[in-house]
């Protein structure tokens, strides 16, 4: 799992272990197993929510998709051809391989190892996400996640926008003993802040724990809190609930999160830590549109059909397997 690594985590800023007299560990309320399905032009993903976890309990998030880790044979990689979005944000984090994209606002680029693309769909946009030509023709490793972050009603129709968060801009942190590498993408952990700008207050980080290592992460008590295991085995919560790849730990109330990697495995525990301030508004959704009412969904469909979310460039109309 390349993403971004550090030879000696001890040189990084440390996350101090919370004072047990002043900070309460958040218990694990449930562990959800991601279900598998096919998306886009035929690629397999694992999805812990929606499905295993109701939308109301995932607030302010809407969806989490996990691709890989896998090795694609030549001409096997698949992507997501042109499609619309309205009413939320997509956050694409690539751990291995690379993905190219285009959009109807004239944007485009390549998301490489350790990079994050933060797309605010807002009032509407069309885009595609495809393997680069090199990844499609040559094959190779692929590992990525996409998170959908809801927008409150007041921001549903905000102008579309991209943030390109490259691997060299991530805030890198470690635990008090250097057994963990924390890549902070957005939000705050302790006194440290990630580079991502968020409309909805959230925290999003990728944590790698060496075998038998433990980390206690201060967490905003007003935020929801989740830990999704990308690879490896370990436990979540002070009570030590077992978790492994494809499992989502849902935390209850408290002040900090505890994660531990299994001692008997040579593979590290790789986890996404995510949570945010619940929006607590009605959610109406239909495929790539997420609004507050059925009438707004109908309007989104009409706007899409009428070309008001953007027009695919003429040179992009032919079906393509790579960018």
Image (spheres, rainbow, N blue to C red):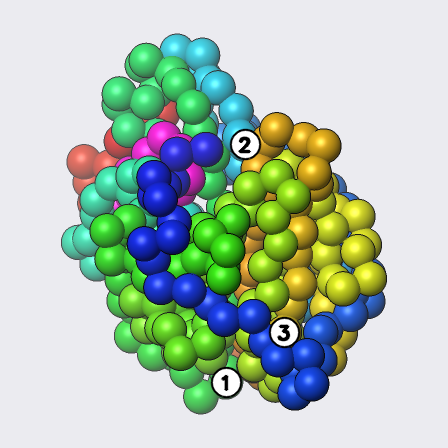
Nearer to us in this view, 17 or 200: 17
SS at mark 2? strand
Quarter location, residue 191: bottom left
Magenta span includes 100: yes
Quadrant where the image shows the C terminus? top left
Query: Could you say where residue 44 lies in the image, as x and y percent from the top left?
Result: 59, 31
- Of badges 1 and 2, nearer the viewer stands 2
Mark 1 surroundings within 10 Å by alpha-carbon count, few (fewer than 14), some (14 through 19), many (20 or more): some
Q: Tell me what residue is drawn at x 35 percent, y 44 percent.
A: 8
Q: Which residue is mark 1?
A: 153
Quadrant where the image shows the N terminus? top left
Nearer to us in this view, 257 or 301: 257
SS at mark 3? strand
Q: Which residue is mark 2?
A: 68
> Disc 3 vs disc 1: Cβ atoms closer than 8 Å?
no
Number of marks present in the image shown: 3
- Which of pointers 3 and 1 lies earlier in the amino acid sequence? 1
Give the answer, above or below, for where 245 lies relative to 201: above
Magenta span includes 74: no
- Which of pointers 3 and 2 lies earlier in the amino acid sequence? 2
Alpha carbon distance from label 3 to label 1? 30 Å
Quarter location, residue 118: bottom left
- Of badges 3 and 1, nearer the viewer stands 3
Q: Which residue is mark 3?
A: 256
């Amino acid at each position: 799992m390349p993403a971004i690594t550090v030879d000696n985590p001890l040189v990084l800023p440390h996350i101090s272990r919370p004072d047990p007299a002043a900070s309460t560990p958040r218990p694990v309320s449930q562990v959800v197993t991601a279900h598998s399905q096919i998306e886009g032009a035929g690629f397999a993903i694992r999805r812990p929510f929606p499905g295993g976890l109701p939308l109301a309990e995932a607030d302010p998030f809407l969806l989490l998709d996990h691709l890989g880790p896998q090795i694609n044979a030549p001409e096997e990689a698949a992507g997501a051809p042109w499609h619309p979005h309205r009413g939320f944000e997509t956050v694409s984090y690539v751990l291995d391989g690379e993905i190219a994209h285009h959009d109807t606002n004239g944007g485009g680029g390549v998301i490489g190892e350790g990079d994050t693309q933060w797309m605010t769909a807002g009032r509407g946009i069309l885009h595609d996400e495809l393997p680069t030509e090199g990844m499609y023709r040559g094959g190779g490793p692929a590992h990525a996640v996409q998170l959908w972050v809801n927008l409150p009603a007041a921001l549903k129709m905000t102008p579309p926008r991209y943030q390109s968060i490259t691997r060299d801009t991530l805030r890198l942190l470690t635990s008090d003993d250097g057994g963990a590498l924390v890549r902070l993408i957005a939000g705050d952990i302790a006194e440290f802040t990630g580079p991502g700008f968020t409309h909805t207050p959230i925290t999003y980080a990728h944590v790698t724990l060496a075998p038998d290592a433990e980390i206690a992460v201060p967490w905003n008590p007003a935020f929801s809190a989740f830990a999704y295991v990308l690879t490896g085995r370990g436990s979540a919560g002070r009570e030590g609930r077992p978790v492994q790849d494809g499992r989502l730990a849902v935390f209850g109330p408290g002040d900090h999160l505890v994660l531990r990697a299994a001692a008997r495995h040579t593979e590290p525990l790789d986890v996404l830590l995510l949570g945010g301030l619940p929006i607590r508004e009605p959610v109406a959704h239909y495929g790539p549109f997420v609004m507050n009412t059925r009438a707004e969904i109908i309007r989104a469909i009409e706007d899409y059909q009428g070309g008001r979310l953007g027009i695919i460039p003429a040179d992009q109309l032919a079906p393509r397997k790579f960018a």
